Amino acid sequence: MGKPTPAPLRERDITRHIAREYYKEFDQLIESDVIIVGAGPSGLICAHDLAAMGFRTLLIEQNLALGGGFWSGGYLMNKATICEPANEILEEVGVPCKKIKECEGMYMVDPPHATGALIAAAYKAGAKIMNLTRVLDLILRNDGLLEGVVVNNTTAEMAGHDLIHVDPIALESKIVVDATGHDAIVVELLHKRNLYNKIPGNGAMWVARSEEEIMDRTGEVYPNCFVIGLAVAAVYGTPRMGPAFGSMLLSGRYGAELITKKLKQGS
């Protein structure tokens, strides 16, 4: 095609249209059907499925990069294991899964490929994403009715209130999903408000039991609050699973099914 010529964009126009498009979209994020906190594999597939169903879905991530711990496998080796049938979810979004013949039910994937594909799939389905955004508190009305989250810019929170005192803002939703992994931030905030028991944190590693328990316990832990993925283990004190990501994906998809049922019942 020969040497391409870049269009001569003006600096003022770049700034103007970044701001214009950002705030136009931001206005639509203030009220959602579902807010998912945590953009790891469980949060990403949950967001994909809910958005694909037509629900207004907002995914909040405190870090700059989405993907949680799925960018690498264990010990910085960028290979990760997926248990059957979670391979079907990744194959659905275009990620090759290598079957390990020596281990029944095990597949191997390249985490950067898988993570990038999950992010792209969530966007393509219509999910909206706010990164560098930290959840600090909850919107609670009428004796504990959960109706959204309170957030601030992560960098402002990292600087500390002594240096940068910036008030947070509120985002409303019908459902809040805790997909924050080990920290179980949303449920921890419920505990802080004396609305939930103290969170034990996940137990020692036992992969098979961990993945089984996560699927058994994925669901609504408090009215309008669902837990998925590794946050389930943190909330219930069940084992951790290390660099095995199958139940993360399966829990995210199953959580989306349960949330869909609840939203349809309430409509």
Image (cartoon, rainbow, N blue to C red):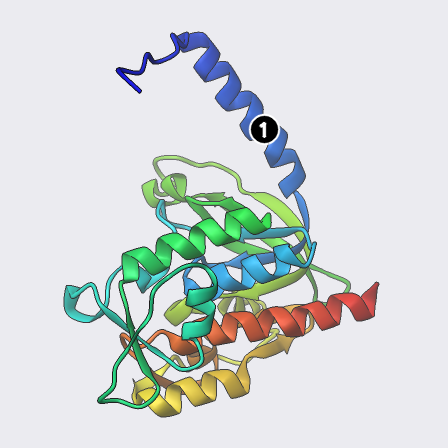
Specify whether 50 is left or right of 116. Answer: right
List x then y, in percent, for residue 41. 42, 64
Q: Is residue 172 above or below residue 42?
A: above
Q: Count the marks.
A: 1
Query: Is residue 88 visible to us here?
Result: yes
- Residue at x-position 53% and y-position 42%: 168
Instruction: Sort mark 1 into few (<14), some (14-19) or many (20+) by Cα contacts within 10 Å.
Output: few
- Residue at x-position 50% and y-position 84%: 215
Specify whether 261 is left or right of 156. Answer: right
Q: Quadrant of residue 12?
A: top left
- Residue at x-position 66% and y-position 74%: 258
List x then y, in percent, for residue 226. 59, 71
- Which quarter shows the N terminus? top left
Residue at the spot of label 1 = 23
Q: Could you say whether the residue bearing mark 1 is in a helix, strand or loop?
A: helix
- Residue at x-position 61% and y-position 68%: 256
Q: Nearer the viewer, residue 56 or 3?
A: 3
Q: Nearer the viewer, residue 141 or 50?
A: 50
Under mark 1, the amino acid is: Tyr
- Which quarter shows the C terminus? bottom right
Specify whether 102 is left or right of 96. Answer: left
List x then y, in percent, for residue 48. 55, 58
Query: Is residue 61 visible to us here?
Result: no
**Which residue extends farthest right?**
267
Q: Quadrant of residue 243?
A: bottom left
List x then y, in percent, for residue 24. 62, 28
